[in-house]
Amino acid sequence: MRKRKKGRKLSRKKNQRRALLKSLSSALILKEKIRTTEAKAKEIQSFIAKFVTKAKKGDLKSRRLLLRFFSQKVVKKLVEEISPQYKERSGGYTRIIKLGPRKSDGARMAIIEFVK
């Protein structure tokens, strides 16, 4: 039974799920808008919020913590370009726009983007 368990499994094992979230988050940071399934978008939303909050500090410790998850290029963009936009904001950095189902398998699609 899955009582009081946080997060979605996304039909993957733990290490695969974590790699998927890292790659989708990196793509979202670099492109600022990606198209994915609704379940993945909802899962990324909470995952990315933690990193934006850390990046808002902008000190060396937070950069090193971010470098554990992302590449240098991603961290630089997150700390220098994205997080300064949200200095006054205490949360809700991303928005999910729901789209219709995908033609091939009927999966519900969504666009996740940073709020401007």
Image (tube, rainbow, N blue to C red):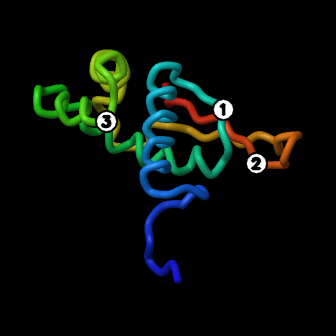
Residue type, numbered disc 1: Arg
According to the picture, the residue beneath numbered tag 2 turns out to be 108
Residue that extends furthest to the right in the rendered view of this protein: 103
User: Badge 3 local density, few (<14 within 10 Å), some, or many (20+)?
Assistant: some
Q: Is residue 25 left or right of residue 104?
A: left
Q: Nearer the viewer, residue 14 or 25?
A: 14
Q: Position of residue 67 (x, y in %)?
A: 25, 29
Q: Earlier in the sequence, mark 2 or mark 3?
A: 3
Q: Secondary structure at mark 1?
A: strand
Residue type, numbered disc 2: Arg
Q: Nearer the viewer, residue 77 or 56?
A: 77
Q: Position of residue 3 (x, y in %)?
A: 48, 81
Q: Residue at x 33, y 44 (%)?
A: 50
Q: Is residue 69 left or right of residue 43?
A: left
Residue type, numbered disc 3: Phe
According to the picture, the residue beneath numbered tag 1 turns out to be 35
Q: Quadrant of residue 101?
A: top right
Q: Nearer the viewer, mark 3 or mark 1?
A: 3
C-alpha span from label 3 to label 1? 22 Å
According to the picture, the residue beneath numbered tag 3 turns out to be 69
